Image: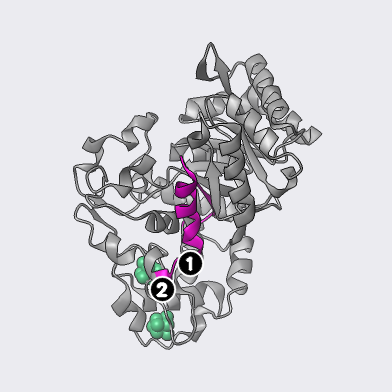
């Protein structure tokens, strides 16, 4: 298992993480088997969102004696009331809900306390200036949460939260189809087939800005809906007009700037094994470039996907990462210090490009790589 830094908070998470919704209605023995497998395979990042709190009692029991093996992402502002899930900003309900989570999990802290489901700027403003943020900051001060997170499907709301400096971790819905759509306050727009009927070209600029800003500011992203709720894996349902594989979807999410962990859902041990198998899959199975370039309804021409399909470079240049760092500076109009540091850590710089052109013949998106290498030298000086 490969581990990645979760932004600036000093915690490493497995690049394959786990969402818990599929655990609902499972017995303790079944939940325990999931936790056994996760521990054995090094899957340490668990998102605890699930409507029914009974599951958290099973999880708490299953984690006895091994709590420290996991990084827990809990959600503030989600409660179970009258037998139903409820998103709430009522601070008394929020406090009671979080206390219940800790009790059921048999712990006195979680690594991430996530303000749940903020899909509009107005909701973000309300959270930021109201008792929800006050409570989150208080929890962080006491150590009951080690960092403040936010979950969202809307790049505008998420970007405002990230730029506020108050959010350490972002949970966001990322896959190659959602990434083409403009921001919307209604999450249903992501699933609406009508929104995919017209030709879609390149990533939505606000989503691109969101991911780049997260990387620049050290806000780690944990990814939800990498498979679009399973739709992307189905030829019939995929908005791309063609089925993608789980490995392609996971790899796509992991190659977005700022992403630390993809929280895969699993309804069975076999589902979880399939996602964990990503770690041992050959590059050819992860590579999404040629498949995406041939999708009937979607185009990324001229846009670097950070897919790595242009490798190998005879000079050993990591073209995808050089391009990613270059794009971060272009977006900012300056060279952020963290980006300079990351660039400096590359074993080979753009200055080693011999302009052989081999990469451009392999890039299915027509990216002007040789020109980009020259620009990177101009920006980074090497
Ligand atoms: S330059 Fe092309 S092949 Fe290389 S990482 Fe970017 S999109 Fe992929
Ligand atoms: S053109 Fe430059 S970056 Fe591309 S393969 Fe050749 S040396 Fe590497």
Look at mark 1 in the image and give the residue it sits on: 326
Is the C-beta separation of discs 1 and 2 under 8 Å? yes
Magenta region includes residue 20: no
- Crowd around label 1: few <14 · some 14–19 · many ≥20 (10 Å): many
Image point 44% across, 55% down: which residue?
250
Magenta region includes residue 259: yes
**How far across and down, in percent of the image, does residue 366 sit?**
28, 70
**How far across and down, in percent of the image, does residue 340 sit?**
60, 67
Look at mark 2 in the image and give the residue it sits on: 372
Distance of mark 1 from mark 2, alpha carbons? 8 Å
Q: Which residues are the magenta region?
A: 256-283
**How far across and down, in percent of the image, does residue 149 sit?**
61, 38
Q: Residue furthest top?
A: 82
Asked if residue 130 is positioned above or below residue 191 in the image, the reply reads above
Ligand 2 placement by image quarter: bottom left
Residue closer to the observer: 287 or 28? 28
Asked if residue 270 is positioned above or below residue 88 in the image, the reply reads below
Question: Does label 2 point to a residue whose CB lies under 8 Å from ligand 1?
Answer: yes
Earlier in the chain: of badge 1 and badge 2, it is: 1
- Does residue 301 appear anywhere in the picture? no
Instruction: Locate residue 266 relative to residue 338 in the image: left or right.
Output: left
């Amino acid at each position: 298992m490969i581990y990645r830094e979760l932004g600036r908070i000093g915690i490493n998470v497995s690049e394959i993480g786990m969402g818990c919704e599929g655990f609902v209605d499972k017995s303790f023995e079944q939940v325990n088997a999931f936790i056994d497998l996760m521990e054995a395979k090094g899957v340490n990042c668990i998102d605890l969102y699930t409507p029914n709190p009974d599951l958290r009692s099973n999880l708490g029991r299953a984690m006895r004696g091994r709590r420290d093996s996991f990084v827990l992402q809990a959600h503030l502002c989600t409660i179970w009331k009258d037998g139903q899930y409820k998103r709430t900003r009522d601070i008394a309900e929020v406090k009671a809900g979080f206390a219940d989570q800790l009790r059921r999990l048999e712990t006195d802290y979680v690594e991430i306390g996530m303000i749940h489901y903020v899909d509009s700027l107005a909701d973000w403003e309300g959270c930021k200036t109201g008792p929800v943020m006050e409570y989150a900051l208080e929890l962080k001060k006491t150590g009951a949460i080690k960092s403040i997170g936010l979950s969202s499907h809307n790049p505008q709301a998420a970007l405002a939260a990230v730029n506020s400096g108050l959010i350490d971790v972002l949970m966001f819905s990322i896959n190659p189809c959602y990434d083409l759509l403009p921001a919307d306050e209604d999450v249903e727009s992501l699933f609406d087939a009508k929104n995919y009927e017209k030709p879609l070209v390149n990533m939505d600029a606000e989503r691109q800005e969101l991911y780049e800003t997260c990387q620049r500011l050290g806000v780690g992203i944990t990814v939800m809906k990498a498979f679009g709720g399973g739709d992307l894996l189905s030829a019939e349902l995929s908005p791309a007009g063609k089925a993608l594989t789980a490995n392609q979807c996971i790899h796509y999410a992991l190659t977005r700037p700022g992403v630390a962990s993809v929280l895969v859902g699993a309804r069975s041990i076999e589902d979880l094994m399939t996602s964990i198998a990503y770690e041992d899959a050959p590059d050819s199975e992860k590579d999404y470039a040629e498949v995406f370039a041939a999708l009937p309804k979607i185009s990324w021409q001229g846009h670097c996907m950070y897919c790595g399909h242009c490798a190998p470079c005879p000079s050993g240049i990591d073209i995808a990462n050089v391009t990613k760092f270059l794009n971060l500076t272009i977006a900012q109009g300056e060279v952020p210090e963290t980006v300079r540091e990351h660039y400096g850590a590359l074993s080979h710089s753009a200055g080693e490009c011999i302009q052989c052109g081999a990469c451009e013949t392999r890039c299915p998106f027509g990216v002007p790589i040789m020109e980009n290498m020259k620009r990177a030298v101009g920006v980074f000086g090497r």
